[in-house]
Image (cartoon, grey):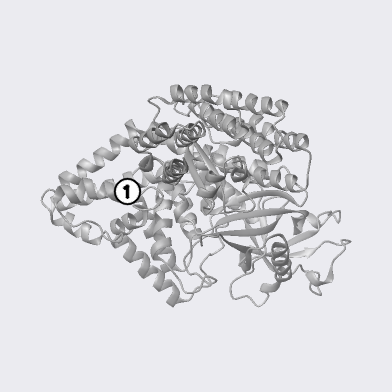
Amino acid sequence: MAENMSVKQMMDEVANELIVCKTNARMAKISHLAIMEEALNTDKTFFKHTFCTGSYSEGMPDYIRSDVDEMYVLSFGNVVWQASNENKTCTAPFVAEIYPDEPAYLKLKLADGIFKEERFFDEHSYFKSSSFMEWALVANQFFTESKCEINGPSVTQTHTFEMSATEMRDKVLCFSCDSWPSCTDDYFTRQKQSNWPSQAILSEIRRLDCHVVSVGRHNSDTKDIEWRLSFSVAERKLIHEMPAPFFGCMFALKAIKKKYILFESQQRKPFCSYFIKTACLWMCETIPSKTDNIMDLTRKVIDWLIDCYKENNLPHYFIRHQNLIGHLSDVCRNKVIQQLATIKHELWVRVMSSIAGGEVSLRPVIKRQICDKLKIADVINDDYSRLETDLLKHPKASLVTRSLKNALHDLRHTQKPKTLEWLLLQWMSRDIEPISKKVLVWMKHDVPISEIIGNIESIVLPIIRDIKSIVMKGYDNAFTTALYQFLGDLILSVMVCSQNKCKEYQKKALCYYKKGEKIIHPNGNDDNYSGMRGLLVKFHYLMGNDSELKGAITDFETASQNNTFISSVEIYADNENRDLSYRSWEIDGIFQYAIKDHNCVRFSLKTIVFYIKAKMALKSGHIDRAYQIVDQMNHENLKKTDKYSFILINTLERSIADYANDM
């Protein structure tokens, strides 16, 4: 029995380590998103502020989210509370009337003296949320060709790419409140057993806006004129500050929910990701942050949720008296209780099957380190139940699982810097979509190139100036470098697409590359200039600067020696709003043809430099040299370390063969 417990404990430890591995990119993703938002919020014509919410904004791995959640704070109105209207000097359009029995919900009444458009208001001047959503749907359909439909307070846009891939975005239009409502006072004053969040964080939360979104109470006869409070910005801030084990717990439960807790109706879900977030926030207040056993913590969160469903009361995190499940029937609640109880009973199996795949699959590690060593059946179709059974009865299971746990633990501590460097590079090389979209619009409207470059600088340089206050602590140097390199790349793309190779603009691009010459990681390591020098190779190739290209290649090869992780280049080919990176390769039709059927590809700069070397060898008629370069690409196993490198390797092999046949 004791041995069996030891095996179970070691299995939990393995799961703990895997969860940590899967969430390593959290801070880099959050930092990248913060920069995206800064770029997006430079234009306040229609919106006071735009921000992302949900799993994407929390730094969750991409594969557990089904969409991107975005909130747009409208600039033409804000909400004040009823008490503040007593002096009759209210200048805000809307006065809120909260429902005392459900204080997360409210009605919005048009303030006296404000012009109203009849279709948006009832006979008592209450703003109709239903009419607002109909307007929001029409507005979204006007600006996009994507399929749009109303989903709660959001308009869901579904865009289908040529390769049948889809991207869903939930866009929520909302109003900001002039202050937090009095029903949230308890949150700021209640005793928190774990002393989390700290008073400093609470003060920051108090300064953030809360918002009103267009969705009414469940089962209400007056839903047509009802709205709901939203604390998405505050929730996001708290999750960014959440201790890592609690974040790991939230990730594990969200992954399990996505895979196992499914409902026929998406409109009336008795259990959702928001309830997981709420539970984890409550538990952060209750359990000391020193807790580091993610699996045990997950069981405690499940127990808390089960108790809430049994008592028919899941309290809103900021408004304790708002019951999030009060509308559910006994039958619905009992079904959720049964599902949660099953998940807790089979937690190891459910966690492993939900997280072991994804962006970086850990299944090969499980097979090599456990199944092969114990000579037991491999995991099939992500079903870990057979593996759990085999481990619990195998005499050497404890030894092998402990060995894997220790190996993962050592890897996390000795190799964590390198792992984080690689993850950070993936996010640093990502497109800053709002800026790229603006550049495309300016180019389509024939804005002069000097003005386009000036506009780009006016967006990016202030972000660089304020970078410490924008990104997560310790990531400012790395993302400063990334932004300078991004500036150089954008200017390069504008020059190529405009067919303008003005020396002044070339000098400007090279100046920004120089400012972003070295990536300094949060752990103090750097990339030995390899990223910048790889971008210079790309720059001179796309600009047709053959005389400078050879030296740039030599400089890159010197800098990249013994450098395991090198920056990437991200290119969008199947997205009309983000094809600037694709169009910048117009000098190389073969390259464009090779990637044209892919929505997005990411090449290591090492792969790009190899490709350019081979193309230059062909250009000079050196077929044997081109073959040697391709052989070197295969010898360095780029197909394994660079996911999309096979595209360029296969393209080069065909190009060389065609060139040889034409001779």
Residue 113 placed where, x, y %? 89, 61
Name the residue rendered at 36%, 53% in the picture.
357
Residue identifier under label 1:
362
The count of marks equals: 1
Residue 388 occupies quadrant? bottom left
Q: Is residue 118 visible?
A: yes
544 or 522: nearer the eye? 544
Residue 3 lies left or right of residue 338; in this view the side is left
Residue 373 placed where, x, y %? 16, 47
| Quarter occupied by the N terminus | bottom left
* Relative vertical location of residue 377 with respect to residue 59 in this rendering, above or below: below
Name the residue rendered at 34%, 52% in the picture.
356
**Element at label 1:** loop
* Relative vertical location of residue 196 with respect to residue 176 in this rendering, above or below: above
Residue 245 placed where, x, y %? 39, 44
354 or 452: nearer the eye? 452
* Relative vertical location of residue 351 with respect to residue 329 in this rendering, above or below: above
